[in-house]
Amino acid sequence: MAERTTDSLVTFRHPFTLRDIVGTQPPGTYQVETVELAIDGLSFVAFRRVSTTITLPAVGSSAMRREFVEIDPADLATALQHDLRGASAIALHRRSDAQLDQ
C-alpha cells in the first residue's frame, strides 16, 4: 500500500489543551504530521488516515528533545477554533466546570 505523509504547522496564540495530551501547552507554533494509506481496489485514488501526531517539547528535557503525541484531528480543529476566537482552553474549561456546578 502506498503511504503519504503531510506535515503542517499550527499556531496557538493562547494556552491550549487537547484530550490526548496531559496538561496545558503554551502558545506557539507546533508541527502536525498526518499519515495516510492508499485504499487499493478503487477506480479512483483515495487515502485513509492512519495517524495524526503533534510535536511537543519534551517535559523536563533540553530544548532539542521532542515528544510526538498521537492526537484526534477533530480535537485539534476544535482547539484551533477556540484559539481563533481568542478564548484560551483554560478559560473554556473553567466556564464548563462552573456550568456543571450550577
Image (cartoon, rainbow, N blue to C red):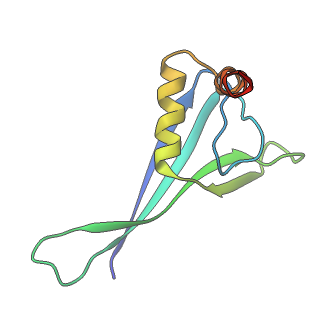
Q: Name the residue at the left extreme.
A: 43
Q: Residue furthest right?
A: 60
Q: Residue at x 52, y 48 (%)?
A: 32
- Residue 1 screen position, x and y as percent: 33, 82
Nearer the observer, 43 or 64: 43
Between 94 and 47, the one nearer to me in the picture: 94
- Where does the C terminus fall, quadrant-wise? top right
Q: Position of residue 8 (x, y in %)?
A: 45, 44
Instruction: Tell me what residue is drawn at x 54 percent, y 23 percent.
Output: 83
Q: How many marks?
A: 0
State the image coordinates of residue 41 (x, y, percent, origin top left): 18, 84
Q: Is residue 4 above or below residue 31?
A: below
26 relative position to 82: left or right: right
44 lies above or below 97: below
The residue at the point 79 percent across, 49 percent down is 58
Q: Position of residue 59 (x, y in %)?
A: 84, 46
Horizontal side of 67 relative to 54 (left or right) equals: right
Asked whether, in this view, residue 39 is left or right of residue 43, the answer is right
Residue drawn at x 57%, y 53% is 71
Between 64 and 48, the one lying in front of the other is: 48
Image height check: is 34 above or below 10?
below
Seen as rendered, the residue at the extreme top is: 86
